[in-house]
Image: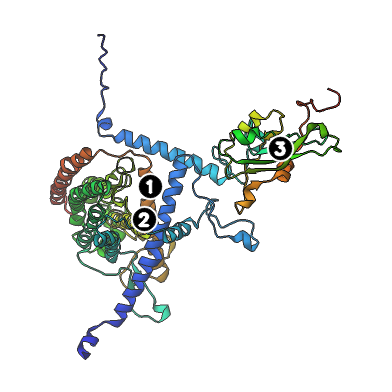
């Protein structure tokens, strides 16, 4: 078996009693302390982001998974057809859908269904993005909103109106319900 | 009855009471709170972080643009918030503990730490003749002639708190912490005591106030550059003094359970050591006791080696400026008295910053290394240092 004999380093006396190590360590920590102190005084921190004042919003990546929302398309139509796939796949069971029929005099009557109620409990939501992934109509998207706060549990449940409000309009992608395909 | 009442020195009692309230409640306890804050801020900047910078006096509510800041750094009310949090937390007593000792232990840590403050000379004299009070007041609660001995006697009682906490908690980690604490503190007590003997030999004095006065007139032990300090004898004696200062300060780290000797509560092995089972204000008392011991220890180091309350180059400064910066018994102006108090606490603050700096630099010792260092190195060094000092004092006697 090939072996390597590692030579122990020859230490000087000041290294043996940790004197130089101690002084070096003190020098390094002092250097860091002074450098960080200076940046703190200029109230610009190098590493730490001072959160409520400074935000990372502009540099959030495209794939960022924030609050799940519902979107309307370019005709103002609710994309959701209340198939309830998202409700079934949602791991923490945060989504609750009550489907409703679209009346026959509605211009989008051929879509047949849309949600009468659509609620996402943001206390339960784990931002996994499975709802977005499973949606056949591309109606639910995870947006970049991450600071979802409320003063009560009821406030933390996003209803349909709120979901469309955050979601906004998305164009393209799903054209099957349009007159001209 | 009359004779007993007459034997009370009422002005002395009132003056002592005022001094106790000032020193303990207005200086040491706030200082403890703020040294925790300093610990957090200094550790933060050493690790390139920011630290607690939010909690401030809400001046912005009153229409000001910014909170009060020192050196552009906020968060100055953090200690108050910490204290409030400790008070409001649930005071949980596990069912398996020995209740009486469990309650006694935090008090036994805190009380000795504060009791040692009694002999600490935190200033020279305060001349209050402008307020109609005749003789100047000595800025020490009890002017004992056995200052350091009293301090060691009382502060060594502090180990009982830790051992009792470890034992009464009835749980393995506190128990190990308590055992380690007792072994460590008893071993380092010896070198701590022996290391100050050279200093006492040079002073020829056991009264901490007189030590400070001597250093004020004749140069600090570690800075003999004025008065009688400018002599061959004092320069030669710097050698044993530096040795005893090194031994003293390292033993002080061990005695106050600070890193690199924080084995009784090392978080990586023993959860939180002897105070694992403690919560709320009882835990806070351990915390306060530890930091109070640190402040008092720094105070002793300052008094012995850095001239106590004396302003460096005091006699020279007095000559140059015409104002009086040095101490003269019974003839120290009011402003100098205040300056001396300020100087003393400034020196302690410096010591505490050093404590914190060392804590965030060094890793922890292993237990056997700690014991070896205490018994095989520092004990012998401190003992030989006593003989060395005696030899040097005999060869080059002081004036």
Q: Read off the residue under disc 2.
A: B279
* Marks 2 and 1 on same chain: yes
Can I make out residue B216 in this image?
Answer: yes
- Asked if B21 appears above or below B373 in the picture, the reply is below
What numbered label is drawn on residue A70?
3
Q: Which residue is mark 1?
A: B356
Disc 1 crowd, CA 10 A, few/some/many (<14, 14-19, 20+): many
Looking at the image, can residue B324 be seen? no
Q: Secondary structure at mark 1?
A: helix
Residue that lies at the very extreme toward the bottom in this rendered image: B2
* Residue at 29% from the left image edge and 45% from the top image edge: B262
Structural crowding at the residue carrying mark 3, measured as other residues with C-alpha within 10 Å and reported as few (<14), some (14–19) or many (≥20):
many
Mark 3 vs 2: CB contact within 8 A: no
Disc 2 crowd, CA 10 A, few/some/many (<14, 14-19, 20+): some
Is the residue under label 1 in contact with that under label 3 (CB below 8 Å)?
Answer: no
Image mark 3: chain: A
In the picture, measured across the screen, residue B222 lies left or right of residue A100, that is left
Q: Which quarter of the rendered picture does the C terminus of chain B lie within?
A: bottom left
Look at 21% across and 63% down and name the residue there.
B150
Q: Chain of mark 1?
A: B
Q: Position of residue A122 (x, y in %)?
A: 61, 44
Upstream in sequence: badge 2 or badge 1: 2
Q: Secondary structure at mark 3?
A: strand
Q: Quadrant of residue B339?
A: bottom left
Figure check: B302 above or below B388? below
Q: Residue at x 42, y 40 (%)?
A: A30
């Amino acid at each position: 078996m090939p072996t390597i004999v590692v030579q122990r380093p020859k230490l000087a006396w000041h290294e043996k009693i940790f004197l130089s190590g101690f002084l070096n360590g003190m020098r390094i920590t002092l250097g860091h302390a002074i450098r960080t102190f200076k940046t703190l005084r200029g109230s610009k921190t190098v590493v730490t982001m001072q959160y409520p004042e400074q935000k990372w919003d502009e540099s959030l990546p495209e794939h960022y998974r924030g609050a799940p929302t519902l979107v309307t398309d370019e005709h103002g139509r609710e994309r959701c057809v209340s198939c309830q796939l998202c409700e079934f796949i949602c791991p923490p069971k945060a989504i609750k859908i009550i489907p409703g029929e679209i009346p026959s005099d509605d211009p989008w009557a051929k879509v047949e269904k849309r949600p009468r109620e659509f609620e996402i409990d943001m206390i339960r939501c784990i931002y996994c993005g499975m709802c977005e992934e499973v949606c056949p109509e591309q109606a639910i998207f995870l947006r970049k909103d991450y600071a979802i706060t409320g003063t009560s549990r009821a406030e933390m449940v996003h209803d349909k109106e709120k979901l469309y409000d955050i979601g906004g309009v998305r164009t393209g992608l799903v054209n099957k319900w349009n007159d001209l395909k | 009855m009359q004779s007993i009442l007459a034997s009370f020195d009422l002005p002395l009692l009132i003056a002592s009471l005022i001094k106790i309230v000032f020193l303990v409640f207005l200086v040491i306890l706030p200082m403890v709170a703020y040294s925790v804050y300093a610990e957090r801020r200094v550790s933060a900047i050493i690790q390139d972080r920011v630290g607690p910078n939010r909690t401030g006096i809400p001046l912005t509510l009153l229409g000001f643009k910014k909170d009060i800041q020192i050196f552009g750094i906020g968060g100055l009310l953090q200690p108050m918030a910490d204290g409030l949090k400790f008070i409001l937390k649930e005071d949980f007593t596990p069912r398996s503990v020995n209740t009486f000792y469990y309650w006694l232990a935090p008090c036994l840590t805190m009380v000795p730490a504060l009791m040692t403050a009694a002999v600490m000379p935190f200033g020279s004299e305060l001349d209050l003749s402008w307020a109609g009070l005749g003789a100047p007041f000595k800025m020490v609660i009890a002017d004992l002639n056995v200052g350091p001995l009293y301090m060691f006697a009382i502060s060594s009682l502090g180990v009982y708190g830790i051992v009792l906490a470890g034992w009464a908690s009835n749980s393995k980690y506190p128990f190990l912490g308590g055992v380690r604490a007792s072994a460590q503190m008893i071993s380092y007590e010896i070198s701590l005591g022996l290391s100050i003997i050279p200093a006492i030999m040079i002073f020829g004095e056991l009264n901490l106030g007189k030590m400070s006065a001597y250093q004020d007139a004749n140069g600090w032990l570690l800075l003999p550059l004025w008065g009688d300090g400018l002599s061959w004898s004092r320069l030669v004696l710097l050698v044993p003094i530096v040795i005893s200062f090194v031994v003293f300060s390292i033993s002080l780290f061990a005695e106050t359970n600070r890193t690199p000797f924080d084995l009784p509560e090392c978080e990586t092995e023993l959860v939180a050591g002897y105070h694992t089972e403690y919560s709320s204000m009882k835990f806070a008392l351990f915390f306060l006791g530890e930091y109070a011991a640190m402040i008092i220890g720094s105070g002793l180091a300052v008094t012995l080696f850095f001239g106590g309350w004396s302003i460096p180059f005091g006699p020279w400064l007095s000559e140059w400026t015409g104002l009086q910066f040095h101490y003269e018994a019974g003839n120290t102006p009011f402003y100098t008295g205040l300056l001396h108090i300020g100087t003393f606490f400034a020196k302690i603050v410096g010591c505490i910053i050093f404590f914190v700096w060392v804590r965030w630099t060094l890793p922890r010792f292993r237990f056997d290394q700690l014991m070896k260092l205490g018994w095989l190195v520092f004990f012998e060094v401190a003992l030989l240092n006593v003989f060395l000092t005696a030899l040097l004092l005999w060869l080059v006697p002081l004036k």
